Structures are given as structure tokens and as C-alpha cells.
Image (spheres, helix red, strand yellow):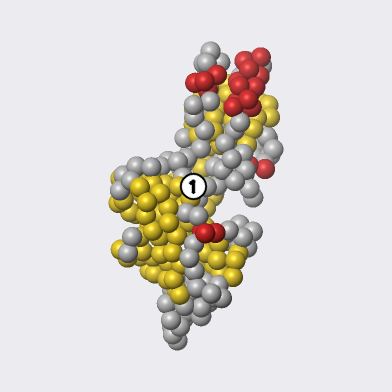
Amino acid sequence: MRLELVRPGLLDPYRLIVTRRDPGAMPPPGEYALAWRGRYYEVFSRSADAPREVAPGWAGLALRPAPCARVKQLVRRAARIHAEALATLLPAIVRVPLARAGHPSGWGRVRSGWAMQHPGTLGARFTLPGAGRWELWLQGQLMAPIDVAVDGRRVASIAGQLSGNSLVPGTLPPLPLSLAAGPHRLTLTRTGFSLAPGNGGAAVLAGALLTPAGTPARALRVLPVEAAPSTLCRRRYRRIELVRR
């Protein structure tokens, strides 16, 4: 279920929500708090005194931030109905432009990614806004062994990842990196075939993105009615709910 498509009240019967770890996906509404995080999944729990959505708000698609005019409109509406505008902040994400990546001939396009149909190496460049600890997230179905490197330095070898489907690709657990600000190069190599289990399986890379290490599962902020419009629109919001506590 895509949580950005859920209407207010539809989740009321559910005290727990289990989601795949994916910084690009919509988290549960603000009435749910992170209760547990594993390697692949997160569990959000709703408490009895959590704020409840009382009127339709706004939810983005595909990491599209809320337009400034919409933000101001919702804050004014919250004031009229004596509610609060509770915003889910859009996380800081650096997407690797796979569509422009160098790749072997014979690899097929899969939306914005690639079907790695035979041995070879994909190379894509990306730019980081700051230095420090980052996490690299790969999306797709990677059954065959894939070697991952950044700037020529081997990061990991991954295989046996078959979650997700063609419409909603699975997101693999993050790979930790320490990188400087500026341009970098990501390479993914499908190695030669062998008789090892799963070696001839699917290798479909649907996406690659980076987030600063320690990025929370969800960050919330109440948008004050008295704030100036320029202040309200200074941050980027993924969802805005109209709630009462």
C-alpha cells in the first residue's frame, strides 16, 4: 500500500504499520511513532494520545515537495478550524542519475534503471552537497552477484535480493560511506556466470540514492500560524496533516 494515497481515517483500525526501509517512500501519518527498526523493515506504533487528522491535508508523490502556496493555504485552514498543521519534512536525498549512466551494450532499460542482463559494469556520476558520512541505497531485484564501488573503492558485493516487484522495486539495506563534497562515481559490476546458486538470476537495478547517515525515519514539524510566508516555505515538506491533539 502506498501511504501517500491513503485517505484520512482509513488507517484507524491499525495500531501497528510495518514498512520497508526506504528513505524515498512516504512514512506513516504523524499519529504513528517509530517503535522498531531492523535491517529491512520498520515498525510504527500509534498511541492513544497521538494527534489525529481531522481534515484532508496534502501528500506528495515521488518526493515532490509541497508547493509554497499549498503550505500557506493549509496553515490558514488549520487556524480556522482550531487545528495544527503537522508537516513531515522531506528528507535530504541525492539521487544518482542512472538514465545517463555508461553501460554495456545489450543491457535493457527498465524505467529509470537497467536490466543487467550479462556481465559488465555500469558507471554513473553524482555530486554531494557536503562531506561526511553518507548511506547508499540501491533499489531493484538483484539475485546475481553485483560488486559495488564508489570512486574505484569497493564498497560491497550484494546478491540474493529479490524483494519488491516491477512497479514497486525493493530497497536494499543501506551501505555506509565516508565521502567528500563534490563529484563522485558509482560503479556496479555484474561478474561472470558460475554454477553458484542464483548466479544466473535476475539483476535489475531500478534506482540508487544517498542520504546523510543518521537520517531519521521521519521528521515532523508543527507549522506555526504566525510564521511569515517566507519562513513557512523555507523547508521542503512531504506531507502536511491537519490534526488535533
The number of numbered discs placed on residues in the rendered structure image is: 1
Q: Residue at x 31, y 51 (%)?
A: 179
What secondary structure is marked by label 1? loop
Quadrant for residue 63, please give it: top right
Asked whether residue 243 is in view, the answer is: no
Amino acid at dot 1 = Pro
Q: Residues within 10 Å of mark 1 (few under 14, many from 20)?
A: many
Q: In the image, is residue 212 above or below residue 175?
A: above
Q: Residue 219 location, x and y as percent?
A: 47, 35
As rendered, which of 15 and 2 lies closer to the eye?
2
Q: In the image, is residue 48 above or below residue 177?
A: above
Q: Residue 43 location, x and y as percent?
A: 50, 47
Q: In which quarter of the image is the C terminus?
A: top right
Residue that numbered label 1 is attached to: 23
Left or right, 154 with reference to 89: left
Q: Residue at x 53, y 13 (%)?
A: 226
Q: Residue 7 location, x and y as percent?
A: 69, 38
Left or right, 196 with reference to 163: left
As rendered, which of 180 and 147 lies closer to the eye?
180
Q: Which residue is drawn at 65% across and 22% down?
A: 73
Q: Which residue is drawn at 67% across and 43% down?
A: 5
Asked whether residue 87 is in view, the answer is: yes
Quadrant for residue 78, please give it: top right
Q: Residue furthest bottom?
A: 195
Left or right, 217 with reference to 163: left
Q: In the image, is residue 235 above or below residue 138?
A: above
Q: Residue 144 location, x and y as percent?
A: 48, 74
